[in-house]
Image (spheres, helix red, strand yellow):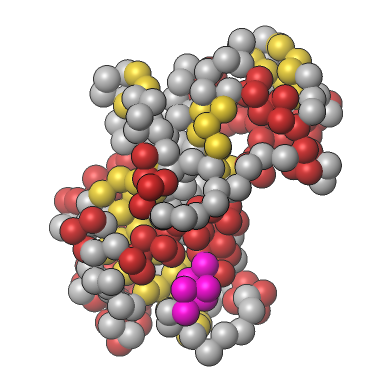
């Protein structure tokens, strides 16, 4: 293991909580940064391996001082990419000034390298900023989270598995537990040269939406658009991305096509891990 000390931002979010749990399972000590105005750290389980520090995310000097004092090698950002996207730039500058060696940005979704859709492009722009300031990054593309599938197919509106298009295009889907575990595993097991400025493409499942429908025991309801307000939301955009092949972690924006061999190609880096599968329980909550 090249890196010895870690800091996690966004530890109570969906991805962050799973990274938090996985780091504890790896029995490593790490720092958790939370906002001064937040009581979110109270929701975290206590552990002798975890030190929680409240900081002002907008105060680069303050954040940098904390990272430097704790000799942090790796900063993992699991902040909400919509609400906290701008904060990542302050975190990046702080990390660079503190001598942090690796930044794991809040990607954790569809491929963003070369993307033009705003939310995805924003993530790619941030990755370019990390490169510009000379701070190595490790980007993790996961495809769609299992827990978001009911929303993406409009089940939360009409209790139907709505599919825009034919639903025959393969896409990548990942369980939050697999994402958190993967991040913790590679950071604590891989050498720096396999982490620095690398992209990791993982997936728990590689299925079409029609195949997902079959796994959860629901008939695919083919529609022109998602029900209610979902059609114009980012969820509607995600369905179109999936139909076009861009829901795969093997998607290549430069070539404008998927490389099936790239989809989930990072899974092999976590040997002997049993990846989770989609079950009907996902739609029974």
Tell me: residue 148, above or below residue 16: above
View extreme (front): residue: 272
Residue 154 position, x and y percent, is 73, 28
Look at 34% across and 25% down and name the residue there.
259
Residue 28 sits above or below residue 211 on the image: below
Q: Is residue 179 above or below residue 174?
A: below
Would residue 76 be found to the left or right of residue 173 on screen? left
Which of 257/88 is in front? 257
Q: Position of residue 199 (x, y in %)?
A: 30, 45
Q: How many marks?
A: 0
- The residue positioned farthest toward the bottom in the image shown: 48
Q: Quadrant of residue 149?
A: top right
Residue at the spot x=46%, y=55% of the render? 272
Tell me if residue 160 is in the magenta stretch. Answer: no
Q: Residue 237 placed where, x, y %?
A: 55, 25
Work out which quarter of the rendered image holds the N terminus and state it: bottom left
The residues colored magenta run 22-27
Q: Residue at x 54, y 51 (%)?
A: 274
In terms of depth relative to the viewer, which is nearer, 97 or 15?
A: 15
Instruction: Residue 251: tell me if it is visible.
Output: no
Q: Indicate left or right for 236 with 132 as reference.
A: right
Q: Is residue 26 shown in magenta? A: yes
What secondary structure do most residues of the magenta stretch adopt?
helix
Q: Position of residue 152 (x, y in %)?
A: 65, 31
Q: Is residue 162 above or below residue 119?
A: above
Q: Is residue 140 visible?
A: yes
Q: Residue at x 37, y 22 (%)?
A: 258
């Amino acid at each position: 293991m090249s890196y010895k000390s870690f800091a996690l931002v966004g530890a109570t979010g969906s991805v962050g909580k799973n990274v938090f749990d996985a780091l504890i399972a790896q029995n490593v000590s790490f720092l958790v940064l939370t906002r001064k105005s937040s009581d979110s750290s109270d929701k975290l389980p206590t552990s002798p391996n975890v030190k929680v520090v409240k900081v002002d995310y907008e105060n680069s000097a303050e954040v940098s001082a904390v990272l430097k004092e704790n000799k942090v090698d790796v900063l993992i950002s699991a902040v909400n990419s919509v609400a906290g996207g701008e904060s990542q730039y302050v975190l990046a500058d702080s990390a660079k000034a503190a001598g942090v060696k690796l930044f794991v940005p809040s990607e954790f979704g569809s491929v963003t390298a070369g993307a033009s859709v705003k939310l995805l492009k924003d993530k790619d722009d941030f990755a370019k900023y990390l490169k510009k300031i000379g701070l190595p990054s490790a980007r993790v593309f996961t495809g769609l989270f299992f827990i978001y599938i009911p929303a993406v197919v409009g089940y939360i509106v009409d209790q139907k598995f709505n599919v825009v298009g034919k639903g025959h295009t393969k896409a990548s889907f990942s369980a939050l537990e697999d994402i958190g575990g993967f991040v913790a595993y590679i950071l604590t097991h891989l050498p720096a040269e396999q982490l620095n400025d690398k992209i990791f493409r993982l997936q728990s499942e590689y299925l079409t939406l029609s195949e997902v429908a079959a796994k959860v025991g629901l008939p695919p309801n083919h529609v022109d658009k998602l029900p209610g307000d979902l059609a114009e939301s980012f969820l509607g955009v995600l369905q179109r991305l999936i139909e076009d092949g861009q829901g795969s972690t093997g998607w290549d924006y430069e070539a404008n096509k998927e490389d099936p061999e790239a989809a989930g190609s990072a899974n092999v880096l976590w040997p002997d891990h049993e990846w989770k599968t989609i079950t009907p329980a996902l739609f029974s909550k």
